[in-house]
Image: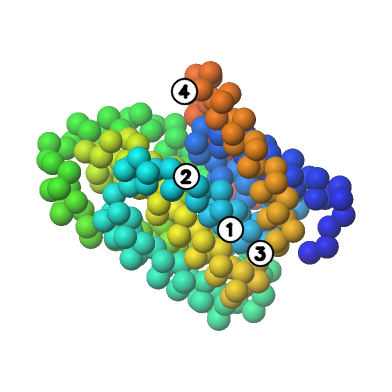
Amino acid sequence: MNVDLLSFATYILSGAGVGLLIGLTGVGGGSLMTPLLILFNIPQHIAIGTDLLYAAITKASGVVAHQKRGNIQWRIVLTMLAGSIPASIAITILIYFYFDNASEYKHLLTKTLGIMLVVTAVVLFFRKQIQGLSASNSTTTLNIQLQNSIKLTFFAGIFLGVMVTLSSVGAGAFGTAILMILFSKLPSMHIIGTDLAHAVPLTFVAGMGHFIVLNNVDFVLLAGLLIGSIPAVSIGTKIGARLPERFMYNLLAGILLILGARFVLF
């Protein structure tokens, strides 16, 4: 896709805006970037494919940081990846063989994106209740939870693999909610680190599938988004420490709910 300087500047500003929100809330990469790109008239398949690689790149450093702090439960990560990676590859291949061109499956991508935005918004609105519910329902140890939830974790991975590949949304807030429910004994930072460690390889594989198989990645767009977002995330993190957490999450959830409804209904 050929772009002029004005368009490239728009990509940078888009990346900066989303990066700022990621820094403020810790959520919002796929959830905000993809719908924003679509609203800027980037085709759905290009927005989703490019955003998947954007997410993999921007979240990779977070995995390193969490690993250094011992926040990642690799058994859970590998179990989820055993479901999500094959599911992502399978859905990419199905799209390639079933549809002749992107215009034939853009409706599927748009509706899936809308549904996942609404689901993510609901998760954000009720995240405290989800945390409380998972904690109150569990009297078992973490080891017992790991043993009892292996199958559910695997199937959760399959679900995320399909939905993330189709929409680029779900590996963040929704993945975190699944882990909170299945593994209530995990400390919150372990939940975040484990979800992040699963999200990076999943979004990378899904993004590469969109690139290699479906030709859905625009690297000029990707470069602009990265240039804008990387410094903005740092700024947002500093500002976010001074703002009420509940207000920021509710604001983000409200935005996602409106965007999700738009894509589902129109």
How far across and how far down the image is residue 50, in percent?
A: 64, 58
Cα separation between marks 4 and 2: 23 Å
Which amino acid type is shown beneath numbered disc 4?
A: Arg
In the foreground, 53 or 103 = 53
Q: Which mark is residue 53?
A: 1
- Dot 2 alpha-carbon crowd within 10 angstroms: few under 14, some 14 to 19, many 20 or more: some
- Mark 2 lies on a secondary structure that is helix
Left or right: 192 in relation to 184: right
How far across and how far down the image is residue 224, in percent?
A: 73, 50
The answer to whether mark 4 and mark 2 are in CB contact below 8 A is no
Q: Identify residue for label 4.
A: 246
Q: Which is closer to the viewer, label 4 or label 1?
A: 1
How far across and how far down the image is residue 215, in percent?
A: 65, 71
Q: Earlier in the sequence, mark 2 or mark 3?
A: 2
Which amino acid type is shown beneath numbered disc 1?
A: Leu
Q: Which is closer to the viewer, label 4 or label 2?
A: 2
- Mark 4 lies on a secondary structure that is helix
Q: Earlier in the sequence, mark 1 or mark 2?
A: 1
- Mark 3 lies on a secondary structure that is loop
- Dot 4 alpha-carbon crowd within 10 angstroms: few under 14, some 14 to 19, many 20 or more: few
Which amino acid type is shown beneath numbered disc 2?
A: Gly
The answer to whether mark 4 and mark 1 are in CB contact below 8 A is no
Q: Identify residue for label 2.
A: 62
The answer to whether mark 2 and mark 3 are in CB contact below 8 A is no
